[in-house]
Each structure stands twice: as structure tokens, then as C-alpha cells.
Image: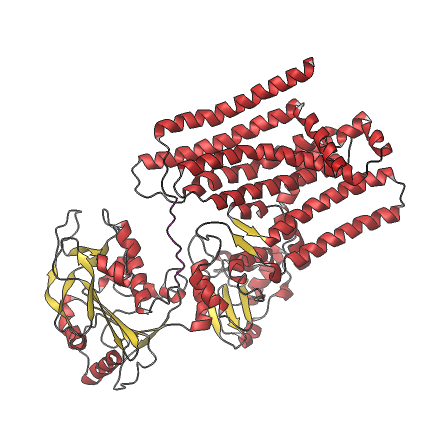
Amino acid sequence: MKTIFQIAYAEIRMLFYSPVAWLLLCLFAFQASMAFSDALGRIIEIRETEVEYLPFQTYRLMVNGVFSIIVENLFWYIPLLTMGLMSREYSSGSIKLLYSSPLSCNKIIFGKYIAMLLFGIFLLFILILQSVCANLWIKDFDVLWVISGIVGIFLVYSTYVAIGLFMSSLTSYQIVAAIGTLATLIILNGLQGVGQNIDFIREITWWFALTGRGGNFIQGLIGLEDIIYFLTVIGLFLTLAILKLRSERRSDSLFVKIGEYMLVAGVVLSISYVSSRPFLMKYWDATNMQLNTIPPKVQDFMKRMEGDLTFTLYVNVLDRNYEYGMPDRRMRNYGLIKPFLRFKPDTKLKYVYYYDECDHMRHDLVKSGLSSEDMMLKICQEEDYDEHMFLEPEQVHKEIDLSNEGNRLVYVLERGNGERSILRFFDDNNYEPSEREIAAALKRLIDGSPKVCFLTGHEERSITKIGDTNYYMLVVRNSRNALSNQGFSFVTKQLQNVDSDLEDVDILVIADPQKFYSDEEIQAVKKYINDGGNLLVTGELVNRDVLNQLLVEVGVQFDTCFVNQCSYTGNAAELVSGRITQIAATELGIGQSILKQKGHIVLNGGVGLKLQENKFDYIPIVKSSDSYSLPLIVALNRTINGKEQRIIISGDADLFSAGELRMEREGIDNTNFEFMQNVFFYLANGEYPVDTTRPEPTDDVLYLSTDAFKWVKWGFMVGIPLILIAFASLLLLKRKYT
């Protein structure tokens, strides 16, 4: 070991007597300082616009501002740094002295590699200095996240250096070594997209690709798989460099040389396979807010997931977005659900490819007039797919009926007991399901789905009919925020002299009925209420008598007049801009973020609600901005039959209508959609939509003043490079004249 450090000392000494090393150090310091100053300047600029709340300053400054830029540009420094490590020995002839010395090839390579690691520490000192300053200037600075990022950058650097050392051992020409190193790094960074259509090749190239490995550390996620990857790739290239030196030092046969390389390749492939197995999926989330880990509530139900779990992606090649499910996207799709697999690593992933008519047909096929089979054959011919990989419609129908999904791209989640849950893709820019939708689909498998029943038969607002006054946006199939994609199941029922029709209903919705209910229907609703069922009622002034006959049971009545307010925005007076009450946000958890953001609940012709009998605990949720005495939306709750009963009544039926949810008005921050989700979350006893929120970030204050920032910027961008240049000049002059 002493010999290795002596070689490392000699190499680092030679390196710092070279102007190239100092030039790289100055360039790195300037680039890192410029990134740091730009990110710091953006934060101050936003602060100067009097933004009240600016969170995630650790991320804005160090992670996104500095680390992401450094890791993207780091490979440009390595070829110049490593090109002479062994090439210089070859070209000067000193390699013969090394061969004739008692030094082993291992010691030579490890000594030079350690020298490069020491130089890397000098580079990282710039980032450490920036992090220390940021820690002094930012409230609740996320130190562990930043440490994770610096470790990730160092591991990427260490891997690049190992590759450069190997390339330098292949040639006596330094420029060739530099070009070879750069080419190798570019190939390894782009390897992720190679061979993704081939099952065996896919996992190998994805594993070997450098892209994203350091990014995980920078995002604060330290994974065992990534650590094994870096150690394996570093070990691979150092071993290859050692074998190259040994092959020139010894006269081994070609068979022995090939055997050694094959053994190394076999070991690396074995490690890559084992390290990517689910049982080694161990992670540590270094961020304060656990941003890389599914929220605790989601973890809880994932731990209750017993037995087999299978994600099956059904891919219809005629679907407009079929490419999201093709083989070249499998590793990306795996990454989408990987955070959940950490808590159930034995989850299976399957793919079923087929062709069938769908309601989201590819544009180029809509007017082709071809049969489904002919369209599939045309696609296979144009895009070089094997036609035999696509099942016929009849073959898929035997396994599952996807007609209700329009035969579109969809995940089917299935447990060993046969329980199934649908996970859709969505008609928006992101398209893929997010953490919230995946969590909802998984939770349905364990806890079931709250059944929401809309009463029909009295011209109520409909979830099945299109129109601005209807509630169909709650259940739009491929709309991400629709409640049908957040864990709820919806049915419609028309009560017809059957008082037990509502026994399996979790939430009953009575949305602005236009006609009176029969006595039998009233009794059915009253029985549902008396049994402790949760209820949502929305209505208008013109139909107050229809609803009041139902609401006698809960002690609340619709008033006799509109609530108007002065319109300072140019809107009609009956357009009420409601505000969430503090008590609703505090005690019920309804509208907390809306209240914080000072959002509005827009009611188009609100009716005040009067409490007549105190049968429930009564809490007003929304009042008009003009502070009218009568609330516009109220919550009622009580404990009955051993459970809490929750009822919400709204003096306006338009607030959840499709027209109002889509409406944008100047001067009014309409948060009706968010409020609607809050209401159903409350009525579903906090089970759905799945709560994926995390604690509020606290790194939201920058103590550095605007005037001080100017000095900081000059100090980092000019001062540090000048200090390095001065020190380098003195050192080089000293060497020249001593």
C-alpha cells in the first residue's frame, strides 16, 4: 500500500506542475461559480418581486442550479486530465523502467488512479465551499441532500477517470487517448437507448448506461444498485487497464488472454444481473422531505399488500399512443412504478400486445378503410414489427374485456386472489399516470373503492350526459383529475319503491333535482341518512322546495333568496366569489391549500343555508367574500352506528358543473376543481383521492441581501479563479527557478 501512495504522490506532484491541470481547475471553478451565481441571482430576483413563499431553495440553488450543470459537463474535463496517465509513460519510454522494476501492474494502475481521485477532491472543494455558504444563507438548508449530490458527482468523476486511465493505457499518443476517452464516455452516456427492442440486450445496455446514475444521487436518492454499478464499472476498467499492462509484461498465450477478458466480462454481467434483482432494491432517501419515497400513507397500504401482484400493460398497436407500451419503453415504464416496487419487490410485470378497434385510433389509420388486421399488418411493415407478437381480438377477449376502456393503452393490476384494478393513461401533456393515480389503483386492490351513487329520475345533474350544467367531468375516463381515476367508482340509480337500494352505497349524491320525490323515495333517502350514510346535496333557488323535503331529516333548509355581492371584476352580481372558512380548513381539512393561496370558490347564484334543527355538528365551509351571515356550503357530521357520518350541502349546483370547472374569469382564481376533490376526500373519510402530499418545505428564506450578492458573485466568479491562477503561477515559477 505504501508503494501505491508513493506512485500516487509522484503522479499528483507531476500533475500540479503541469499548466493543463491548473487550467482545468480554473475552468471548473469558473463554471461552477457561474452556475452558483446564476441560480442565486434567480432566487434573489424572484424574492425582489415580493413573492411571499419561495420554497425548495436548496434544490433551486445547489441541486438544479449547480449539480445538474456540473454532472452534464464533467466528461469534457476528463480526457484532458487522463490522456497522459499511461500514454506519457509509453511515449517517453519510462514504461520500460516500470516493467523492469519490482512494481506490480496493480500498484502502477492503482497509484495513478488514486492520484486522480485526489485531484477530484480539489475539484469538489469548490462545490463544498458553495454548499457551506448556502448553508449559512438559506433557512433549514437540506445538508444531507447536498452531501448526496456531491457524493454522486464524485462517483461519476471516479468512473470517468477509470475509463480515461484504461484508454490511456491503450496508446502512446495522448491525443488518441483523449479522443478515445471522450468517445467512450459519449457511448456509455447514450447506451440507454441501444437495443431496447431486444429482451436480453435491453437490460444489459440499460444497466451499463451512465445516464441517470449520478442523477439519482443528485436528486437525493442513494441506492444500493447505483453504488454497486459505480464500483463495478470502476473495477471493470481498472482491471482492463491492469490486464493490458500485464499482457505486455508477460508473454501469455492468446488463449489465456482471451480467457482473462471473458472471465472479467462474466463477472461484470453476473453482478449487473444480481444487482438489478428486486431483493437488492435498497435505497436511502437523503432529502428532508423524503421526496424520492412514496408518502407514508401509501407505504402503509403497500405493506398490507399480501400475495402476488401483477402489472399487465395491454398495448393495442392501433391506439394513437401505442408507442408508450412498446418494448423499447419497457425500462422507462419499469422506472415509473419502481418507487412502489421497493415495498413489494416480488411484483411481476407483463406485456400483452394485440390489435383491435379502439376509440383513440391512430390519425393515419382513421380514414384508411382497412380492417383491424390489415391496419396491424401495415404498421408492422412500416415500422418493422413482427406481426406474430400481436394477438387477435378474440384471443384478448378470452382473457379480459377492455371495451369499456375503448381498447386503449391501459394497465391492469391484478392480485393473486383475482382482484383487478385499472390504471389508465391520460389525455394531457404528461400522458403517463403519476404517483397519485398509481397509488389509487393499488389501494383499490386492498381496500376496495368507495361507491358514489348519483340519484336519477328527477332531472338531476348527470354524470353520463355531456353539457355545461352536468357533472360528467367527475368521471371522464381518461382525464387525470377525474374522481373515477382517483379511486372512486360511480353508479347511477333511480329509486323505485325499493328502500334497500342504497345499502351498498358509500356516498350518495343528490344533484339539483327538478321534480319532487315520491314518499317511497323520500323514505329510502331518509333510511340511508338514518343508517349513517355520507351524503352530498347541491341545489338551486328555483328547486329549494324539492330539496327541503329531503333535508328536513338533517335540520338544514335552503333560504328563499339569492346571495349577491358587489362585482368589482365586471362579472354579474349573482356570481359569488366564496371563501373557505378557517374552521373548515382547520377542523375538517377541507380547502387548506385553497385558503392558503387565497383561492375562490365560484358559485353562480348561491343560496344561503339555514340551520333549523341542531341534529348534527354544523360547520360552515364557504361564505361569500362580502361576509354574509348565511353560509353557502355547510358540513354536517355526527357519530352514528359506531362511525362518523359526513354530509355536505351546497346552496349552488353549478359549482361542480362541467361549465364552471372549465371556466376562467379575469380577476378570480377559480379553485372549484380542487375544492370538489377536497369535498369527496372528506366524504370518503380521507381514503380517496389518495393523500400523496408531503410536508411543506421549510427552506424558503434566503438571508443574503441583494447588495451582498454582488460581492458574492464577484468573489466566486473572479476571486477564486484569480487565486488559483496566482497560486499556479507561483508554483510553476518556483519549479522553474529551483
561 in the magenta segment = no
Q: Is residue 407 visible?
A: no
The C terminus - image quarter: top right
| Magenta residues, start to end | 691-699
Name the main secondary structure of what is drawn in magenta.
Answer: loop
- In this figure, which colouring scheme has been used for the structure? secondary structure
693 in the magenta segment = yes
**70 in relation to 678, above or below:** above
Residue lying furthest top: 737
Report which quarter residue 693 is drawn in.
Answer: bottom left
Tell me what residue is drawn at x 45 percent, y 50 percent: 288
Q: Position of residue 327 (x, y in %)?
A: 60, 58
The N terminus - image quarter: top right
Residue lying furthest left: 560
Q: Position of residue 45 (x, y in %)?
A: 36, 34
Q: Is residue 55 left or right of residue 391?
A: left
Q: Position of residue 371 (x, y in %)?
A: 54, 66
Q: Position of residue 544 (x, y in %)?
A: 14, 70
Tell me what residue is drawn at x 46 percent, y 72 percent: 446
Report which quarter residue 488 is drawn in.
Answer: bottom left
Q: Is residue 632 left or right of residue 370?
A: left
